[in-house]
Amino acid sequence: MERRDFLKTSAGLLAVGTFAKGFSIESIQAPPRKFAFRNYQEKSSVGRVKIVTPDDGYYIHTFFDVCPFSPSQQYLAVNKLPYQGRHAIHGDTVDICVIDLENETIEKVYSTKGWGYQLGANLNWGRSDRYLYTNDIIDGRAVCVRIDTETKAIKAFAGPMYHMAPDESAVIGFPLEMIDGYQDGSATQVGYGVPSFGDRQDIIGAPADQGLWKTDLATNQTRLLLSLKDALGFIDDPFYKGANCYFFHSKYNLQGTRILQVFRGVFPGSAKYHPTLLSFKPDGTDLNKPLSQEQWSHRANHPNWHPDGEQIVMNVTPAWLGEQQMRFCSFHYTGSDFKILSTKHAGSGHPSVDATSAYLISDYYVGEYRKLGYKDCPIRLIHLSTGEEVAICEVFTDLDIRESTFRIDPHPVWSRDYKKVCFNGAPGGVRQVFVADLSGFL
């Protein structure tokens, strides 16, 4: 990949360097722009809820398990999409924006074509407010990009990013064009990587030379952390015989001591994926299988680390315990200590808990909250000790879309001090980002 020293990034910016050393990319110079936050459902919301994005486009944050608040919590990282209601096409760009929550300004800091409707451009903060990380497609490769919010310097690295190590030492990721798959639904799942490009070929079987890649950000060296072949061998489940194998969701715990990894098997001629949950150390050793394919098959979704770094929180239907309803559950990364967090409330959406395990937040899909009689999607806040549930507020998410791949989900996510919640919504049918301040309620 050192055959060219000069090339253009997805946004037409000049990139200079090599993947071995890292590309330096010319920066975007656009000063912060003032705008006014808008109060939302003042009389009916829990806490103080504001829309914190301008009404000049379509905005989302990243995901329910990636904190959009900067380490100081003064800034919020958001994606400004070029459109909504049609597929993300290779070549179309998303603007990466930083919102100053104290001064009510927004600043465009980068543009990238490495995006999808569910994660946007996958924005991850480093250890300070200075560095913000995203992905881009450069010289035919989907790679991690670092944005220096102080100097505006941009640097591209050699490997892809699905998630950032909490000490900012490395990024991990399966090839992002493989995660997203094709628009016909083949491979894994559209909206979580980057639009497919080039001459990408689907994976056959479980190759030894493909899997989860780890890029050291100090040396810019990328290595295969865990191959698909080794993962399948460890899982040792005859169910996957004949399946083509992929990695999907990859996630460090907050302590940086373990990674959880969703493994998926897709059978030829089918777009349906069959997951198993793995966990391992950051060097790829000490593999565990906290949730098997058979357990997952009873209907489960959205694994997420508990803040303690030991437990995993997830929607699971624990049929092996005689339970037929999907519930909010937790279990150790080895699979032991399985608990149903609430038998009073049905599991749904994208759950996460605070550091004390006192509160759980989640949301619903459109079909779920319609059946319950809600007009709009409630942002769920459940006190796990008392079983009390309240809606922080309700937000419109029922966009008039033809396909679920470009739906909008609230993806509620805690702030770093667990006093605020950030989520998506679409008031008036336009994607916006909200922040609920719960400091006077919790």
Image: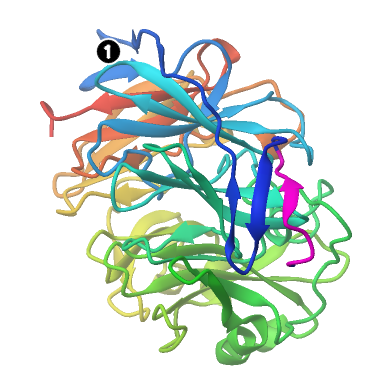
Q: Which residues are magenta?
A: 2-10
State the quadrant of the N terminus. Answer: bottom right
> Is residue 7 highlighted in magenta?
yes
Q: Main secondary structure of the magenta part?
A: loop
Q: Position of residue 274 (x, y in %)?
A: 66, 68
In the displayed structure image, the side of residue 295 where residue 413 appears, left or right? left
> Is residue 271 highlighted in magenta?
no
Which quadrant of the structure image shows residue 140? bottom right
Which quadrant of the structure image shows residue 151? top left
In the displayed structure image, the side of residue 441 where residue 297 appears, left or right? right
Q: Position of residue 89 (x, y in %)?
A: 79, 37
Could you tell me which secondary element the residue under label 1 belongs to?
loop
Q: Which amino acid lies under the numbered mark 1 shown in the image of this protein?
A: Ser
Image point (50%, 14%), residue name? 427
In the displayed structure image, the side of residue 185 where residue 364 appears, left or right? left
Image point (63%, 85%), residue name? 232
- What's the image's color scheme? rainbow
Can the viewer see residue 349 in this picture?
no
Query: How many neighbours does mark 1 have within 10 angstroms: few (below 14), some (14-19), or many (20 or more)?
Result: few
Eyeballing the image, is 258 above or below 139? below
Q: Nearer the viewer, residue 250 or 344?
A: 250
Q: Position of residue 333 (x, y in %)?
A: 35, 76
Image point (27%, 76%), residue name? 337
What residue is pinned by disc 1?
44
Q: Nearer the viewer, residue 409 or 174?
A: 174
Q: Nearer the viewer, residue 165 or 146?
A: 146
In the displayed structure image, the side of residue 402 where residue 251 appears, left or right? left
Q: Nearer the viewer, residue 360 or 62?
A: 62
Image point (78%, 38%), residue name? 91
State the quadrant of the C terminus. Answer: top left
